[in-house]
Image (cartoon, rainbow, N blue to C red):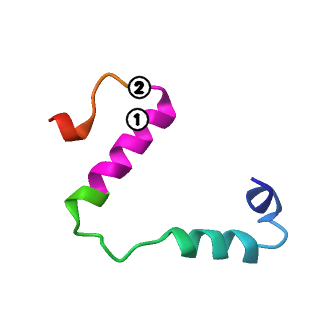
Amino acid sequence: MLAMERSPVRDMEIKLLLQAALTDKVGDRAVYMKGIDASYRYEGYSTFKTEDM
């Protein structure tokens, strides 16, 4: 959060954090579905999981 708050002044911290979180597995279905699950969890939804579909 601090890196995000400071990014308008100094963006190097946020760039390093984002770069470390990137993946080259853009075609990997499992990675894609995990992202959807994480997004739903963040929004407070827990009724469905992509692995159950």
Dividing the picture into quadrants, the one containing residue 24 is: bottom left
Q: In terms of secondary structure, what is the magenta stretch mainly?
A: helix
Would you place residue 44 above or below residue 41 in this image? above
Residue type (three-letter) at the residue carrying disc 2: Tyr
> Which portion, as a residue range, is magenta?
32-44
In the drawing, does residue 11 fall left or right of residue 35?
A: right
Q: Which residue carries the number 1 mark?
A: 40
The location of residue 45, given as percent across then percent down, is 41, 26
Dot 1 or dot 2: first in sequence order is: 1
Would you place residue 16 above or below residue 41 in this image? below
Along the viewing direction, whichever of 30 and 4 lies nearer the viewer: 30
Which quadrant would the C terminus be assigned to in this image? top left
Question: Is 17 contained in the magenta span?
Answer: no
Q: Residue at x 34, y 45 (%)?
A: 36
In the drawing, does residue 13 fall left or right of residue 19?
A: right
Would you place residue 51 above or below residue 44 in this image? below
Question: Is 34 contained in the magenta span?
Answer: yes
Question: Do the CB atoms of the residues marked 1 and 2 lie less than 8 Å apart?
Answer: yes
Question: Callout 1: 10 Å neighbours few (<14), some, many (20+)?
Answer: some
Q: Residue at x 65, y 74 (%)?
A: 15
Under circle 1, the secondary element is: helix
Residue type (three-letter) at the residue carrying disc 1: Tyr
Dividing the picture into quadrants, the one containing residue 8 is: bottom right
Q: Residue at x 50, y 36 (%)?
A: 42
Q: CA distance from mark 1 to mark 2?
A: 5 Å
Q: Residue at x 45, y 34 (%)?
A: 41
The location of residue 26, given as percent across then percent down, is 29, 70
Q: Which residue carries the number 2 mark?
A: 45
Dividing the picture into quadrants, the one containing residue 52 is: top left
Question: Callout 2: 10 Å neighbours few (<14), some, many (20+)?
Answer: few
In the drawing, does residue 29 fall left or right of residue 46?
A: left
